[in-house]
Amino acid sequence: MKAYLDNVVASGLARADLQPAMEMKAAEAIARAAQASVLEIVTSTESHREQDRAAEPSVRAVLHGKRDQVPRMSDDHKILGFSQNTDPCGGYVVAPLVTDVVDETLLAQLQAAGLKRGDAYHIMYAAHGRCDWFVTLDERDILPRKTDIEALCAPLRVVRPSELTVSLGF
């Protein structure tokens, strides 16, 4: 069983400031289940990008210091090929060409369903990573589109932390 933690949940877990309090307790239970290898939790580079934009340096420092609490997915990018260059003196450089878009069709469908770029990326990564749950507290953009997201990304389920803990019985 695998759960993708949206940045709201991953950051709130790192800062211990999720609201309401029952969601914080649920997120902590999810983290304990992951430590006990009952559940795998992941996030993506997109979450790290969002954390890097925190305005307050002390907040960024806390988020950076606790990134290992929620592992980053290993396949949240795709290698398109390689660029090769030579110079007149015999030098040779090879660099990978990488994209963060791992499923162009799904990303377009999610954005057509009304999701913002960052939210669509998170969900695309969760679906691509074969996660069972997408855990979020985003009441403004993601949870209102739960039905559309689940239809596009089946069998991915969009849940709050408290809903996941109830589903898994812990």
Image: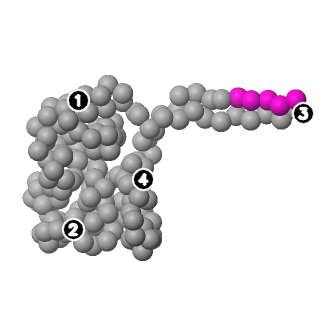
Q: Residue furthest front?
A: 55
Residue type highlighted by circle 2: Leu
Identify the residue position indicated by label 4 in the image.
49
Identify the residue position indicated by label 2 in the image.
18
**Cα distance, mark 4 to mark 1?**
23 Å
Q: Give coordinates of residue 14: x percent, y percent.
A: 33, 68
Q: Residue 116 is drawn in which quadrant? A: top left
Which segment is the magenta one? 84-88
> How many numbered marks have been drawn onto this rendered protein structure?
4
**Cα distance, mark 3 to mark 4?**
38 Å
> Residue at 74% of width from left, 35% of height from top?
93
Residue type highlighted by circle 4: Arg
Is 97 situated above or below 67? above
Q: Residues within 10 Å of mark 1 (few under 14, many from 20)?
A: few
* Foreground disc of the pair 3, 1: 1
Which quarter of the rendered picture does the C terminus lie within? bottom left
Q: Residues within 10 Å of mark 4 (few under 14, many from 20)?
A: few
Of helix, strand and loop, which one carries label 3?
Answer: loop
**Cα distance, mark 2 to mark 1?**
30 Å
Q: Residues within 10 Å of mark 2 (few under 14, many from 20)?
A: many
Residue 123 seen in this snapshot: no
Identify the residue position indicated by label 3 in the image.
89
Q: Give coordinates of residue 159: x percent, y percent.
A: 15, 50
Identify the residue position indicated by label 1 in the image.
112
Q: Residue 29 is drawn in which quadrant? A: bottom left
